[in-house]
Amino acid sequence: MSLTSLFKDSGELIVLSILADAPQYGYAIAKEVAARSDEQVKLTPGVMYPLLRKLEKDKLISAEWEAVVSDRADEGSEGRRRKWYRLTPKGKRRLDQQVRAHHARVALLELFLPGAEASTNAEEGAR
């Protein structure tokens, strides 16, 4: 699936959803998106990191650096650092809002699909 078309409207929703489960670092977010989509959606660094910066700027997520200790690191060496992202309360509210909007969009689009009228009439008849 094209990231351009999908992410234009859904990138924020996807990343906020991943972070709602637990704090993650960038590479782990990309791996989780790929895993949940059965490898159909892949976040490239050129798409993901600008999006993470925007979400952080908008205060939907917060980030903090953590030193990654490696068995191969020299003594006294900090090693590399990893930036962990977490959802903020504002981000949780935005996620909830986007989930509701997504469900409303899907329900509306369903009305236009072939067979939608028959299922709507059947539901009304069952009432």
Image (cartoon, rainbow, N blue to C red):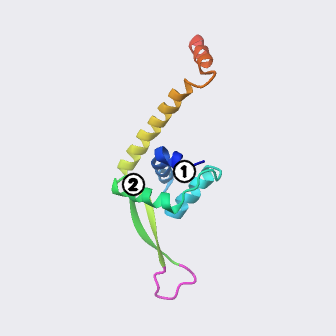
Quadrant where the C terminus lies? top right
Residue that appears at 52% across and 32% down: 106
Instruction: Say which mark, if any, is on residue 55.
Output: 2
In the rendered image, the vertical position of residue 126 relative to residue 2, given as above or below = above
Callout count: 2
Q: Nearer the viewer, mark 1 or mark 2?
A: 1
Farthest-out residue, bottom: 75
- Percent position of residue 108, x then y: 50, 27
Residue 74 is a magenta residue: yes
SS of the residue under disc 2: helix
Q: CA distance from mark 1 to mark 2?
A: 18 Å
Residue that appears at 38% across and 56% down: 54
Q: Seen in the image, is 62 located left or right of residue 2?
A: left
> Visible in this render: residue 122?
yes
Q: Earlier in the sequence, mark 1 or mark 2?
A: 1
In the rendered image, the vertical position of residue 103 relative to residue 116, given as above or below = below
Residue that appears at 60% across and 21% down: 116
Residue in the foreground of this view, choosing between 124 and 30: 30
SS of the residue under disc 1: helix
Segment colored magenta? 70-79
Residue that appears at 62% across and 16% down: 118
Residue 125 is a magenta residue: no
- Occupied quadrant, residue 97: top left
- Percent position of residue 8, x then y: 47, 47
**Are discs 1 and 2 less than 8 Å apart at CB?**
no
> Visible in this render: residue 23?
no
- Percent position of residue 42, x then y: 58, 55
Q: Mark 2 belongs to which amino acid?
A: Leu
Per the image, the residue denoted by label 1 is: 3
Q: Mark 1 belongs to which amino acid?
A: Leu
